[in-house]
Amino acid sequence: MSLAGTTMIMSGGSRGIGEAIALKAAADGANVALLAKTTEPHPNLPGTIHTAAQAIEAAGGRALPLVGDIRDDAFVEDAVARTAEHFGGIDIVVNNASAIDLSRTEDVSMKKYDLMNDINCRGSFLLSKTAIPWLRQSGNPHILTLSPPLELDPKWHTTFTAYTIAKFGMSLVTLGLSGELREDGIAANSLWPRTAIDTAAVRNVVGPGMAASSRTPQIMADAAHVILTKSSREVTGQFFIDDDVLADAGVTDFSGYLNGGREEDLALDFWVEPKGPHDPNLTLGR
């Protein structure tokens, strides 16, 4: 299956997992609109919306960089309209933009709380909502949100409550839209990594020295491609884990996603269980 000729609109995407997903689609010949704020490189955050757009074009896709804030209603509405006009429609929404702060409740500022919820939860809701009329016109419309499985086990809710609320809010967008849009044939799913992924957020926020305990962003890009090439009427309301998706697609060797470390030393991401025996010292989310 291929994404050739489809149009994807993505929040964020200047770097990391979002850029990897965009490049995977571009390699098929997809059109990709990026909604992001980063126009100038940062010492600790390599990549801008413009370098990502150039990489998309180089990979074989067509890029539309749209500079603005996902929290701005007018910007998002204009970006969706411009994307549909430029490429002739919209087939895929990827809610990738996310803010992170792992402070405990007594330490997190309300400004940061609002930032995370406005970008993560509200931003995902806004972009999805605004694109619905165009998705209804697509032959295989998908909304894919990068958020974790919804879990109510207390063991997942003992730290960084503010961030957990913001990420689980994104997952509630998936849950709600999958039911609301099922009759329209619009799929709404979430995708989350089993292990830490080597991104700027992991290096700068979760902790230094995590690279060797992480997988590369390519595993998320490959898993997203599998999901987005499925029939939207057959796969919706799911909370996928990256290596489960690929295993179901026939992948048996995951060594190509290692980032210089060993499989047994990979750190679990937040809110996920190991597939086998695992050192609890390598679990991020507890």
Image (tube, grey):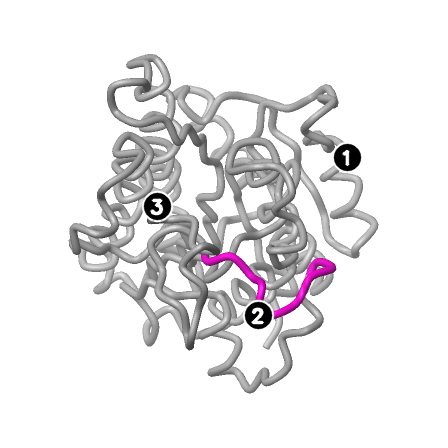
The answer to whether residue 137 is left or right of residue 183 is: right
Which numbered circle lies on residue 12?
none
Main secondary-structure element of the magenta-colored stretch: loop
The answer to whether residue 202 is left or right of residue 218 is: left
Q: How many labels does the image show?
A: 3
Helix, strand or loop at mark 3: helix
The three-letter code of the residue at mark 2 reads Glu
Q: Could you tell which of marks 2 and 3 lies nearer the N-terminus? A: 3
Q: Who's the residue at 83% across and 50% down the image?
A: 58
Q: Mark 3 points at which residue?
A: 133
Quarter of the image with the N terminus in it: bottom right
Helix, strand or loop at mark 1: helix
Q: Could you tell which of marks 1 and 2 lies nearer the N-terminus? A: 1
CA distance for labels 1 and 2:
34 Å
Q: Does 161 appear above or below 149?
A: above
The three-letter code of the residue at mark 3 reads Pro
Where is residue 266 drawn, in percent x and y?
56, 61
Res 238 → quadrant: bottom left
Q: Name the residue under label 1.
A: 51
